[in-house]
Image (tube, rainbow, N blue to C red):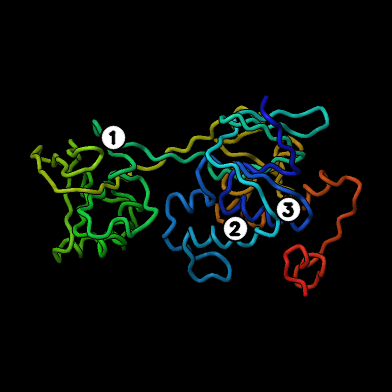
Amino acid sequence: MTETITTDVAIIGAGPVGLFAVFELGLLDMKCHLIDILDRSGGQCAELYPEKPIYDIPAWPVISGQELTDKLLEQIEPFGPTFHYNEMVETLERLPDGGFRLTTDQGLVLEAKVVVIAAGGGSFQPKRPPIAGIEPYEGTSVFYSVRQMEAFRDRELVIVGGGDSALDWTLNLQPLAKRVTLIHRRDAFRAAPDSVNKMRALVEAGEMDLLLGQVSELKGDDGQLSEITVTDLEKTQHTIACDRMLPFFGLTMKLGPVANWGINLNENLIPVDTEKFETSEPGIFAIGDINTYPGKLKLILSGFHEGALMAQAAYHIIYPDKRLVFQYTTSSTNLQKKLGVAG
């Protein structure tokens, strides 16, 4: 039989908001287990744009998605959270004592008194382009995100798409790659005008190529691309040398099993109150991009605020007979001991 793990709080989602929730809960002596469908912490920040700069994190004029994740992991280290990666919560049921039992697709069974859903917008999955035979190249020479820019240095790189991701990575990788070719189905882009203008300037200067059309065929052996065929708007075919391809056809957001947990939903988002960020089910909270309420802003810093208030409410569930005394980390010796910084 599968061993059941018990904890105070189960956090679904190990993105920035889920990670900071560990900090706020830890200050109040609540232990956390985190479950994430990805193979690492950081959520969308680490998976989709780990090296892309973020400019609206307080006290950080600029920080990348991966750097933010690393700093948050460092911040919560004193509280010893347990992570369960590559796991998706399939069932969530209430126990007779008021707590919850979570079961994942990998057979993990976790019981907690409080559940925090910090799953962003759900499970983000890249849309696969309609190119026959693309599967063998995925993960070897066809990638749907950029985890390390250096992996594209001196490569014959083809980027497919016309949105912000396609244009951003075209501009960021053009100085590194041997040659960059941007392919889009039409001469109109959904990206920021400044990015489009910079791309067109590079094309005019002969420093990259722009081809209007669609990728119709891939060629290569053992998962390694060697060239692609592009059919342009006049149905003329072009053969382009290519050993790396980045298709950006958007993301599919799947709410997944959350929709079956008996929680009230509103257009695939979870309504919460703004005092505790609790859902329609007592003891289940939702913070970050997955929740909705009047005035909601989908910002990481908003999720941090939500996590702080959630932790205050969770304390009364975990410790119903204890009085919560509000303390500041700057002046509380008790909190500083928990953080390992007290003299």
Q: Position of residue 143 (x, y in %)?
A: 33, 45
- Can residue 307 be seen from the camera position used here? no
Quadrant in which the N terminus is drawn:
top right
Q: Nearer the viewer, mark 1 or mark 3?
A: 1
Crowd tier of the residue under label 3, counting other residues whose Cα lies within 10 Å: few below 14, some 14–19, many 20 or above? many
Q: Nearer the viewer, residue 323 or 162?
A: 323
Question: Looking at the picture, which amino acid does disc 1 mark?
Answer: Pro
Q: Secondary structure at mark 2?
A: helix
User: Disc 3 to disc 2, how far (Cα)?
Assistant: 14 Å
Pointer 1 or 3: first along the chain: 3
Q: Which residue bears the numbered disc 1?
A: 136
Checking the image for residue 73, the label placed there is 2
The three-letter amino acid code for the residue at tag 3 is Leu
The nearer-to-camera label among 3 and 2 is 2
Name the residue beneath numbered marker 3.
25
Which residue is drawn at the image coordinates 35% and 53% (left, top)? 164
Nearer-the-camera pick, 125 or 38: 38
Residue 72, image quadrant: bottom right
Q: Residue at x 8, y 39 (%)?
A: 236
Secondary structure at badge 1 equals helix
Question: Which sits earlier in the primary sequence, circle 1 or circle 2?
Answer: 2
What label does residue 162 carry, if any?
Answer: none
Q: Quadrant of the C terminus?
A: bottom right
Label 3 secondary element:
helix
Drawn side of residue 37 relative to residue 141, left or right: right
Q: Residue furthest bottom?
A: 343
The residues tagged by marks 1 and 2 sit, at their Cα atoms, a distance apart of 34 Å
Please provide percent x and percent y for residue 131. 24, 34
Sequence-earlier tag: 3 or 2: 3
Left or right: residue 45 versus residue 328 is left
Q: CA distance from mark 1 to mark 3?
A: 44 Å
| Residue for point 27% across, 45% down | 141
